[in-house]
């Protein structure tokens, strides 16, 4: 799930919500999602599902922390608040179109994992990995290559497979890469934390975070345009009775998730 760590004013309100803000408030509603696919992913989440917290729309986008779902999907009341940055005049209180979940902070990534690193890994083969991360296995590399974050980019709530989650945890825990080698921009607010990431619960799905409108209105540091980011055409969830979080029909069943939005204290 994706969030903006830098200030940006929308309708007179700052939509900034970085890992510092998240750590301070501890738990926050994930409001502002105005994309049907992202909404459907949130509606499939269960309490305890793990989340990757992602900094987006900034100099160095990447994974900054770990969180989990604290409350399952419920109507996003900001959609009918005309003063809110993501007000939607087409939705009504008696027939809400948009939903949100509550997300609880767990820990910072001990090493900020930049998108530039993930893209470098996705474009490489195991023998040509950046120096310092030779500890990644072939399976780790293949899992990163398949991440929606590097293959799709703009959707603010994305599935993360078990293998990719394990690879991200390993990178966040061990670090070792050179920012110069992977092309991270100077002055990027990539912070290191003192706490290590908690391991995901066995059999649970996951998620990652940011401001939905910003994701739809502009590409995040060159991320490819997402053809599914459309407001006027709903993507219907599959009526299979399961709680699987799937963005596309061909996605594996065991997935975790990612996203972005304005944040405040719950």
Image (cartoon, helix red, strand yellow):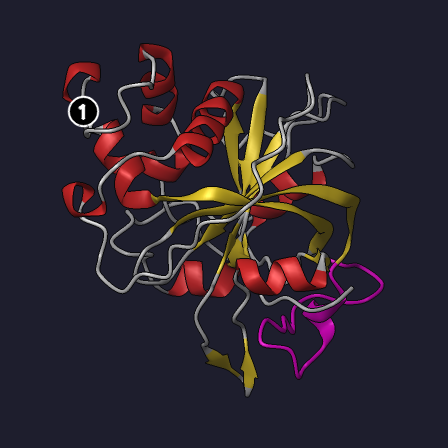
Up the image or down, 229 lies above or below 250; here it is: below
Where does the magenta region start and end? 76-96
**What secondary structure prevails in the magenta region?**
loop
Image quadrant where residue 195 sits:
top right
Q: Nearer the viewer, residue 90 or 154?
A: 154
Q: Residue at x 48, y 42 (%)?
A: 110
| Residue at 76% in and 59% down | 96
Position of 73 relative to 264 (above/below) = above
Q: Who's the residue at 69% across and 33% down the image? A: 49
Asked if 82 appears above or below 230 in the picture, the reply is below
Q: Identify the residue under disc 1.
A: 124
Rendered image quadrant of residue 6: bottom left
On the rendered structure, is 97 left or right of 212?
A: right
89 to the left or right of 218: right
Q: 119 or 33, which is in the foreground?
A: 119
**163 or 13, nearer to the observer:** 163
Q: Is residue 159 magenta?
A: no
Whether 83 is among the magenta residues is yes
Residue 261 in view: no
Q: Is residue 54 left or right of residue 225?
A: right
Q: Nearer the viewer, residue 221 or 106?
A: 106
How dense is the environment of label 1, judged by Cα within 10 Å: few (below 14), some, or many (20 and up)?
A: some
Tell me which corner region of the image, top left, top right, bottom left or bottom right, holds residue 203.
Answer: top right
Residue drawn at (38%, 55%) of the image:
190
Horizontal and vertical percent for residue 213? 49, 64
- Judging from the image, what secondary structure is the residue with disc 1 in? loop
Residue 103, position in %: x, y? 70, 49
């Amino acid at each position: 799930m994706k969030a903006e760590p830098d200030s940006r004013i929308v309708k007179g309100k700052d939509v900034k919500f970085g890992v510092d803000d998240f750590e301070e408030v501890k738990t926050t509603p994930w409001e502002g999602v105005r994309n049907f696919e992202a909404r459907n992913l949130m509606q499939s989440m269960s309490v305890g599902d793990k989340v990757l917290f992602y900094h987006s729309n900034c100099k160095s986008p990447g994974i900054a922390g770990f969180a989990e779902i604290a409350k399952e999907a419920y109507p996003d009341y900001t959609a009918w608040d005309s003063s809110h940055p993501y007000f939607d005049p087409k939705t009504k209180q008696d027939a809400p179109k948009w939903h949100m979940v509550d997300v609880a902070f767990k820990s910072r990534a001990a090493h900020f994992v930049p998108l530039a690193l993930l893209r470098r890994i996705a474009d490489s083969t195991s023998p040509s990995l950046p120096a310092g991360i030779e500890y990644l296995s072939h399976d780790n590399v293949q899992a990163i290559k398949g991440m929606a974050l590097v293959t799709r980019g703009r959707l603010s709530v994305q599935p993360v497979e078990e293998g990719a989650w394990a690879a991200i945890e390993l990178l966040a825990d061990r670090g070792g890469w050179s920012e110069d080698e992977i092309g991270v921009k100077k002055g990027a607010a990539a912070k290191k934390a003192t706490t290590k990431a908690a391991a995901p619960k066995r059999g649970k799905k996951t998620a990652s975070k940011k401001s939905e409108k910003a994701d739809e209105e502009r590409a995040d540091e060159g991320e490819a345009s997402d053809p599914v980011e459309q407001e006027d055409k709903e993507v219907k969830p599959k009526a299979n009775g399961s709680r699987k979080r799937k963005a596309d029909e061909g996605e594996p069943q065991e997935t975790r998730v990612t996203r972005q939005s304005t944040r405040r204290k719950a």
